[in-house]
Every structure is written in structure tokens, then in C-alpha cells.
Image (tube, rainbow, N blue to C red):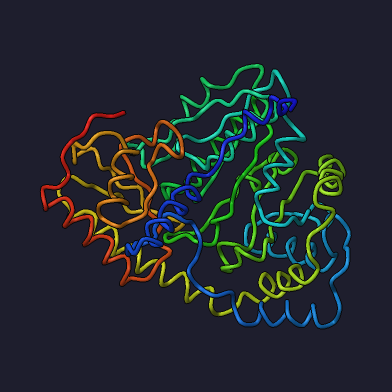
């Protein structure tokens, strides 16, 4: 057989799904596992959203739609962004996709090629680096360090920009750390982007899951609307991961090229999913605020619990639904070793911080999108595992 295209070797993956598979295999053998590996709300989609999707199917809305999305949803998204984030987005700038991940896929494919550089956060969502490499460009990691509360060093960002830098990727609130960029940091980053004529991909998928203050979008900064792609979707805020519904707000010159990418890849997004999205983003069902309040309680509980474990320290995240505890005090080797042992020996599925980049070494990522009862059980298991004397430092393979 002839070999695969070389670019396939440049694609990465998401470790969360690999850890989930290993955890399911242990469960199949009778083990009880607490799942803190997957970034998925454990709440049902709001009832009004489900009803809108069902009604759409019953009306027979199961056919093709325009590639960029139905007009009603594009209008609803633009209205929401303008109200909630102080933007001036026109419906024609909105492109709807099956999930938010295609927005980063299309944006990177549309903008980057061999010889280009793109700066992305480390630790950060692993698909950023994967897609930059797949496009043939060079990824340049921007370190987000614990001592800076996971806010980038702006002097370091400036030093990373070269004449080949074409794209800067931001994510706030941030996966995996829960860090949030301040308005002041966003203002300075916008200044750097303007000075160096950079495109910005602003991943704002967790914008509504923020615990102090309000979300600030770099797209609202002076001179940034024409150079920023805003990525968002319905999976996190509305507990709609399986509906596969996301969107991007694009500068006008990018709309037609990206719409062509949609046409060439997925054709369109399911109509009934989009009808459900109109209800979600226009009405903001009451279940959303119930979920956010519960996330706050869980955040406070798991941070307090982790900080009571000897050898573990955990900062309070400001957004999203992840904690990123520092486990170097355990003295048990690298993050992958600790994550594997916590799964196999303590029965808690977590991710190594290095699943999100080398700067994540010394940390685990735990999702608190699980019940308070299960979060308490997970902390108890890790604490007992540490106290039992079972954790003996082992050589890093």
C-alpha cells in the first residue's frame, strides 16, 4: 500500500479521549473510576432548547441549509455578541459550524502556510498546535506560568513575534488552567497585534463561565475587529456538546473563503441543531445560571480539598471548569507518571498537564464538571492514596 500523506504525521490528538478509553477499560474490569478527564458539562441541555430541536425535526427541517448557517441563527449570534461583549458584528460576519472546533480548523487553514509562524498558549488546548503544524506552519509556544496566574508575560510575547508571525491564538477563560486575561492585558496584547499586523484567533468558548467580573473580548478593542476571529459555541455554556453547534465571527474579507471551506468539508450544520441554538442564545434558559452557580460551588470545594493534600497546591481558577493543581511536591516523577498512577491506583481519571504543552509539567488537569459527591470522592481517593505510602517515587521512563 502507498503511504499516507506526510501531513497526517503532523496531526496531534486530545489526550482526554485516550484517558477516557483507558478509564472505561478499567470499569469494564469492575473498577470504579471517578471521571475528571473530559471537559464536558454533566448537565442536560435546557428543556426549551431540546423542545426547539425536536419541534424542528417534527416540522421536517432535516434538509440542507446555507453553508454559513440559517439567517435566524446568524442574526441571533450577532445580536448576542453585540449585547454581551460590546461588539459591532453583522449577521453576515457569522459562520455557523458543527461544533466550535471547525472554526479554528478553518481559520488556521485559511491563514497559515509553510513559512508562517503562529503563537499559541502553552499550556493550551492541544488542537491549536496540531492544526498549526498540519497547515505546514511553525507553532511558537507562549508560556503561561503559574507564578503569573497563567497570564502571558507581555515582554516575552513581544520577543516571540518575528517577521514571519502571522497569527496569535488567545484563549480566555483558559483551558486547562482556568486563567482569565484582565482588560489591561487584553489591551496590551491588542496593541502588539496592531503594531505587528497580526491576525488574532480569540477562543472564547468559556466566556460565560467566569466567576469574577465579566468577560472582555479582544475583538472589542480599537482596531481589532478587522483582524480578529472570535470562536465560540454552545457546548459549554448550554451543555450542548453532543448537538455539535459552534460559530465564528469573522472579519469581512475572511467570510467567503471560510464559507467555501465549510462547503467543501461538511456542507452545512443540521437545521434542527441551529433552531435549538436560536432558542439557547436568544432566551438564555434559566438552567444556564443554575449550572454556573453549581460550577462555582464545585470549584470552591475541589480547590479547598486539593489544597489539604500534602504535596499538592492549587490556585483558584477564575473561569471555565478546570483546576490545574501543582503536584511537584509529591516527588513522584513527571506529570504523566502521576496521572497514570492516580488512574490505576486511586481510581481517578485526570490528565497530565503536559497533555496541554511542556509548560504544563508538574501539574494535573481535573475537570470539575462532575457532582460535588464525586469531586469529594476523587479528592478523598487521591488524599488516601498519598497518605497510604503507596506513592513511591518511580523513575521516569
**Who's the residue at 78% across and 66% down the image?**
73
**Who's the residue at 17% across and 44% down the image?**
391
Locate residue 72, reporting x and y percent: 82, 69
Of the pair 152 and 387, the residue shown nearer to us = 387
Q: Quadrant of residue 333?
A: top left
Question: In the drawing, does residue 369 fall left or right of residue 205?
Answer: left
Q: Is 235 located above or below residue 294 in the figure?
A: above
* Residue, far front: 1
Q: Is 286 located above or below residue 266 in the figure?
A: below
Locate residue 9, reporting x and y percent: 62, 28
**Who's the residue at 42% across and 54% down the image?**
37
Of the pair 335 and 234, the residue shown nearer to us = 335
Locate residue 69, reporting x and y percent: 82, 60
Q: Quadrant of the C terminus?
A: top left
Of the pair 90 and 27, the residue shown nearer to us = 27
Q: Quadrant of residue 192?
A: top right
Locate residue 210, reporting x and y percent: 47, 59
Q: Is 11 located above or below residue 280 in the figure?
A: above
Q: Quadrant of the N terminus?
A: top right
Amino acid at each position: 500500500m502507498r503511504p499516507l500523506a506526510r501531513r497526517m504525521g503532523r496531526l496531534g490528538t486530545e489526550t482526554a479521549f485516550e484517558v477516557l478509553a483507558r478509564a472505561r477499560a478499567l470499569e469494564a474490569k469492575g473498577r470504579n473510576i471517578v471521571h475528571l478527564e473530559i471537559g464536558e458539562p454533566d448537565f442536560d441541555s435546557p428543556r426549551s432548547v431540546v423542545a426547539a430541536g425536536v419541534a424542528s425535526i417534527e416540522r421536517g427541517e432535516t434538509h440542507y441549509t446555507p453553508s454559513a448557517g440559517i439567517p435566524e441563527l446568524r442574526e441571533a449570534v450577532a445580536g448576542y455578541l453585540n449585547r454581551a461583549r460590546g461588539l459591532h458584528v453583522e449577521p453576515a460576519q457569522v459562520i455557523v459550524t458543527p461544533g466550535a472546533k471547525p472554526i479554528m480548523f478553518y481559520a488556521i487553514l485559511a491563514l497559515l502556510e509553510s513559512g508562517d509562524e503562529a503563537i499559541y498558549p502553552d499550556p493550551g488546548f492541544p488542537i491549536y498546535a496540531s492544526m498549526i503544524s498540519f497547515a505546514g506552519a511553525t507553532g511558537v509556544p507562549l508560556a503561561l506560568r503559574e507564578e503569573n496566574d497563567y497570564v502571558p508575560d507581555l515582554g516575552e510575547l513581544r520577543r516571540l513575534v518575528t517577521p514571519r508571525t502571522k497569527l496569535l491564538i488567545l484563549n480566555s477563560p483558559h483551558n486547562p488552567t482556568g486563567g482569565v486575561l484582565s482588560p489591561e492585558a487584553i489591551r496590551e496584547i491588542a496593541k502588539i497585534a496592531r503594531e505587528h499586523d497580526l491576525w488574532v484567533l480569540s477562543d472564547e468558548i468559556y466566556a460565560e463561565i467566569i466567576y469574577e467580573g465579566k468577560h472582555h473580548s479582544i475583538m472589542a478593542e480599537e482596531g481589532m475587529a478587522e483582524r480578529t476571529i472570535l470562536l465560540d459555541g454552545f457546548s459549554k455554556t448550554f451543555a450542548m456538546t453532543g448537538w455539535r453547534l459552534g460559530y465564528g465571527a469573522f472579519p469581512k474579507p475572511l467570510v467567503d473563503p471560510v464559507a467555501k471551506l465549510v462547503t467543501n468539508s461538511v456542507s452545512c450544520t443540521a437545521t434542527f441543531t441551529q433552531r435549538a441554538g436560536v432558542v439557547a442564545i436568544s432566551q438564555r434558559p434559566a438552567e444556564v445560571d443554575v449550572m454556573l452557580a453549581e460550577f462555582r460551588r464545585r470549584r470552591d470545594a475541589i480547590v479547598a480539598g486539593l489544597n489539604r493534600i500534602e504535596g499538592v497546591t492549587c490556585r483558584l481558577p477564575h473561569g471555565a471548569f478546570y483546576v490545574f493543581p501543582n503536584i511537584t511536591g509529591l516527588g513522584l516523577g513527571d506529570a504523566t507518571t502521576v496521572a497514570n498512577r492516580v488512574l490505576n491506583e486511586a481510581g481517578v481519571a485526570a490528565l497530565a498537564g503536559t497533555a496541554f504543552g511542556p509548560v504544563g509539567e508538574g501539574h494535573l488537569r481535573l475537570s470539575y464538571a462532575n457532582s460535588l459527591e464525586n469531586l469529594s470522592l476523587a479528592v478523598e481517593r487521591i488524599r488516601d492514596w498519598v497518605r497510604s505510602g503507596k506513592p513511591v517515587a518511580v523513575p521516569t521512563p
